[in-house]
Each structure stands twice: as C-alpha cells, then as structure tokens.
Image (cartoon, rainbow, N blue to C red):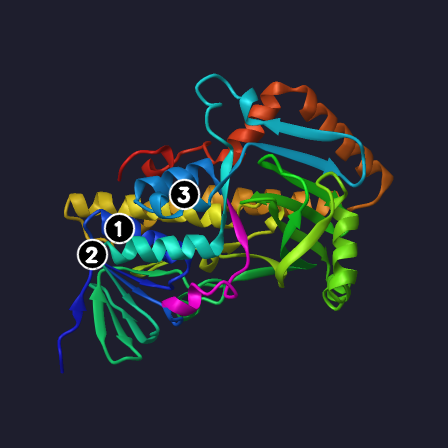
Amino acid sequence: MDRPTQFDVIISGGGMAGLTLALALGQSGLKVAAIDREAPAHQLDPVFDGRASAIALAGVRLFQGIGLWPHVAAHATPIDDIRITDRNSLLHVHFDHRALPAGQNAEPLGMMLENRHIRTGLQAALDACPQVTLFAPDSALNVTRGPARVEVTLASGQRLQAPLIVGAEGRNSSLRETAGIPVHDFPYDQIGIVVTAEHEKPHGNIAHERFLAGGPFAILPISGNRSSIVWTERTATAKALLSLDSRGFEAELQKRFGDFLGAVHVSGPRWSYPLTLHMVPRATDLRLALIGDAAHGIHPIAGQGLNLGLKDVAALAEAIVDAARIGQDLGSPDVLARYERWRRFDTVTLSFVTDLLNRLFMVEAAPLSLVRKLGLGLVNRLPAAKTLFMDHARGTMGDLPRLLRGEAL
C-alpha cells in the first residue's frame, strides 16, 4: 500500500472559511490539504450561492494580507454608512464613517461582496499557491485521530496525514459529530429570504437595516444600482411570500423596501434559509479544531456570520504559524487551547447579542417599543456610542489576530 501523503494541516470543507484558512496557511509556507465534496466548478456557478456578505474592515485587511483582495476588489462595494430604523418610525440612527476620529475615517465600515465573487477569487488565489492541494470533488471516508497524527482516507483512495485536521464543513460537520462534540440548537421561528434587487436610484454606499414585526429587513449595497436583500420573516409568512408569483413577491418587497430608491425589481432567483442559533461547548478536540459554521451559527441580524468565521480563521492561522516557527507540534493541546481561549468569549458574546436583539425588536408590546425608541434616540445623540458601534461593525475591537489588524502573519 502506498504511503500517505504528508501535510502540515488537513482542512475538511472547501467553503469560504475553509479555503480562506487554506490560503492563509499556504501563503505562510505550510503544506495544506483541503477536501470538499463539491467540484470547484459547481461552487463557482452563480446559482450555487446567491448571497452577498458584508465583510467588516478587519476582514478586508485579512483578505489583503493573504493575497485574496486583488482577486475580489473589482467586485467590492464600500459600506460607508449604516442607517437603522425601528418599524415605520421616522426616528433613525445614522452611522457615518466620516464621523469617526481623524485617522480612522478614511476607510469605509466594510465592503459588500457577492459570495460567488469571493469563491471565484479564492479559487484564483489558490491556483497560484502551490502549497495548497485541493481534493475536490472528494470526501473523507475515514478519519483517524491518534496521539501523534491524523490520518484521512479519501473516497478516491488517497491517504493523507497531518498533525492537525480542521473541521470547516458547515453546520452539519461530520468531524464535529464523530468527535462527540454536542451542538446546542435554538431554532428561530423565522426564515431568511435572500434576493438581489435592482432599483432606480443609486444607493450611495449606504446599508439600511429596518426592524420590522417579522424580523430585520436589510438592504445592503452591491455593484451598480443593486442591493442584496436579507429579509427575515416568521416561518408561516415567509412560506406564503415564497409561494407568490414574481409580481406579487415584488409588491410585498416594495412595501417593506419603501420608495426612497424608486421602483424595485427582483433580479435572479430567490433563496431561503431556516434560521437557527447553534453553539458548541468547545471548538477543539484531539488534533481537531472547528471553524466557521461548524463551530457556531448566529442570527443574520447584524450581518456578522462570515465575519465570525473570518475571526476564527485569523486566530487559528496565527496559532498554527506561530507554533510552526518554533518547531512546535501543530496539533498539540497548547496550540488548540490558545485558539479555543482566543475565540470563546467573542463567539459567545456575539451569539448572545444577536439573539437578544432579534427577540427585542420582534416584540410589539408598547413598553418595549418605547425602550427601543429611547435607545435609538440616545445612541443618535451620543457620538461616543456611535463610534463604539462603528468599531464593532468594522471588527476592530478586542484582542485581534495580526491578520485582522492589517499585519502579516
């Protein structure tokens, strides 16, 4: 039998988080294997994933630091401002990046990128990175995590070995399941509807989030006179909306969108996703680390899902690369504990905050409605509170890994 091919790290899952980690490690000189069930051509098909992602400023710095940004920059749309409203109230909060302190206001709060462009950019960057080998379409038939190494047997018959395997397989991670790491699921009675909308007037690089009775309605600027709509509704309402013909669906969309950008038309298909909060008590096990949706899933209310995964990528990449530089075992308990400690507080906090905000803004009761209005009004009058919010939106707060600070690994 042929001897296994040796790698420094094996990544199971070729989604955006998994391939971003593969690129970060490969650019640092480590030999990486990435495994995914889907053929690259299928993932690059526009109908594979119609979503767009709000990439926080810290995530943009990560993309720049690993050589991905040149492959996606032409498709990026700046998020200069964010406007938040509650129901149909005239009161709104305007977060303007120009109001940030001098030296911080030259850059936008983040960038919007359609997921298909991120996937295409990752593939192009990986094609130019010989340190990364992509096994796709393929899958792990057997994974053995021992005291000294991990061995993976692929469906294609190839055998791989490394000191560490990373689970980046999404919410239904098989590595997480076989490791016996429990998942705590908290389903929302909500569905997220995602469409691309064309509108008559330019969006001015402003993102809007409207808190409606069924959930948040986000209008996110993308290239041209287009916006990505993330429309949250209660399950029964969402199913009724999705059953409408094009004219009926657009009429319902226009009601919630308003007319501030003129007439709105849906461009392309509709996507929908049931919304669930899911958390794990730990993101590591023997020679295993979980990243992205394999480790957590949050409500899209703040648009932080992918950014949370990018924080995982930056923290784990730094822990691995630092260990490699001093000759440490890349899958050792010390390396994994560093990653676990680094990410635990931020993950739990953001999960709790997004859950709380969603529940708070869905309640119709007059006392809570008054609290929301008072809160929005107070934030609008406190420049320090606005700056704090914008720092969170940019992902620039806390103990950041080097890549998120714009520094090289």
154 versus 361 height, above or below: below
* Residue at 40%, 34% in the rendered image: 399
Q: Secondary structure at mark 1?
A: helix
Residue 374 in view, yes or no: yes
- For disc 2, the neighbor class at 10 Å (few under 14, some 14 to 19, many from 20) is some
Q: Secondary structure at mark 2?
A: loop
Q: CA distance from mark 3 to mark 2?
A: 24 Å
Number of marks:
3
Question: Label 3, on which residue?
Answer: 73
Quadrant location of the N terminus in the rendered image: bottom left
Is tag 3's residue or tag 2's residue first in the polypeptide sequence? 3
* Residue at 66%, 34% in the rendered image: 83
- For disc 3, the neighbor class at 10 Å (few under 14, some 14 to 19, many from 20) is some
Q: Nearer the viewer, residue 203 or 351?
A: 203
Q: Residue 244 lies in what quarter of the image?
A: bottom right
Q: Is residue 367 left or right of residue 191?
A: right
Disc 3 marks a residue whose amino acid type is: Ala
Residue 385 falls within the magenta-colored stretch: no
Q: Secondary structure at mark 3?
A: helix
Question: Label 1, on which residue?
Answer: 25
Q: Residue 251 lies in what quarter of the image?
A: bottom right
The residue segment tinted magenta is 40-54
Q: Position of residue 122 (x, y in %)?
A: 35, 54
Q: Is residue 176 left or right of residue 387?
A: left
178 versus 170 height, above or below: below
Disc 1 marks a residue whose amino acid type is: Leu
Circles 1, 2 touching at the beta carbon (< 8 Å): yes
Question: Label 2, on which residue?
Answer: 131
